[in-house]
Every structure is written in C-alpha cells, then in structure tokens.
Amino acid sequence: MMGLSGAVRVDADGDGRFQCAAEYAKRIWRSADGNPLSAIHMASDFDAAVQLQLADLLYQQNRDAFFGEVLSIARRTPVKEAFDAFVDSARASERAVVLPE
C-alpha cells in the first residue's frame, strides 16, 4: 500500500504567502546590502535549506571570494554545516563536468 498527500505549505513568517528557501536567501542578501558577513550572520536564524541557498547565491556572485573570505567567515558561525555541505556538493558537481575534447 502506498499513501500520498498534497504538499503542505507553512507560512512561518506570517506574511500570507509561501516563499521557498531561495526567496528567503535572496531577501537576506538584499537586507545585507551585498555584505557577505552580514548575510551569513542573518542566515544563522534560518534553517539549513535557506543557508544552503545563501551559500549558492554567494558562490554564484564571486566564486573566488566564496572559497576564500566568505567560507572562512561562514565556518566560524552557525551556518558552517550548511556551507560545508554546499562546498561538498559544488566540488562534486565540478568534478562531474565532462569537457569536450
């Protein structure tokens, strides 16, 4: 036997609409005015899904800075576990890319 149910959407912030983790990460980034340190500290109040999305956003903004200063800062905060999981995933993806000969 198999059971299915519809998706459950929780309005955790009470704004009356559903927002995915990526939307929360974008909101954090805008609120931080482009400051990675501020964004990382704000993300500490969110779950791992939002933290992972913020890691991806920061990675896409500037990969060199992400693997340097940003990751160094993140590893000293509560987002460490999520950012490390993102790094593992990003590196695995980079290794999986096959370049044409």
Image (cartoon, rainbow, N blue to C red):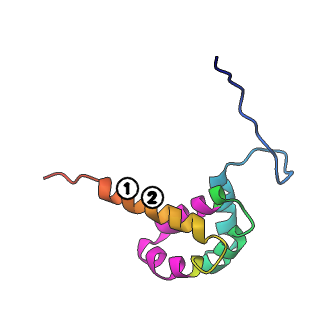
Residue 70 is covered by the magenta coloring = yes
Packing grade of label 2 (10 A; few <14, some 14-19, many >=20) is few
Q: Amino acid at mark 2?
A: Ser
As helix, strand or loop, the secondary structure at mark 1 comes to helix
Q: Residue at x 21, y 54 (%)?
A: 99
**Label 2, on which residue?**
89
Q: Residue at x 48, y 67 (%)?
A: 59
8 with respect to 65 (left or right)? right
Between residue 67 and residue 33, name the one nearer to us.
Answer: 67
Tell me which segment is drawn in magenta: 51-72
How far apart marks 1 and 2 lie (CA) works out to: 6 Å
Please, what is the dominant secondary structure of the magenta stretch? helix
**Label 1, on which residue?**
93
The part of the image, by quadrant, that contains residue 26 is: bottom right
The part of the image, by quadrant, that contains residue 50 is: bottom right
Rendering coords of residue 15 (x, y %): 84, 51
Q: Amino acid at mark 1?
A: Ser
Q: Residue at x 70, y 59 (%)?
A: 47
Q: Residue furthest front?
A: 1
Q: Residue furthest left?
A: 101
* Image quadrant containing the N terminus: top right
63 with respect to 31 (left or right)? left
Between residue 82 and residue 69, name the one nearer to us.
Answer: 82
Rendering coords of residue 87 (x, y %): 46, 65
Q: Are marks 1 and 2 in contact (CB under 8 Å)?
A: yes
Between residue 54 and residue 82, name the one nearer to us.
Answer: 82
Residue 68 is covered by the magenta coloring = yes
Rendering coords of residue 34 (x, y %): 61, 75
17 with respect to 83 (left or right)? right
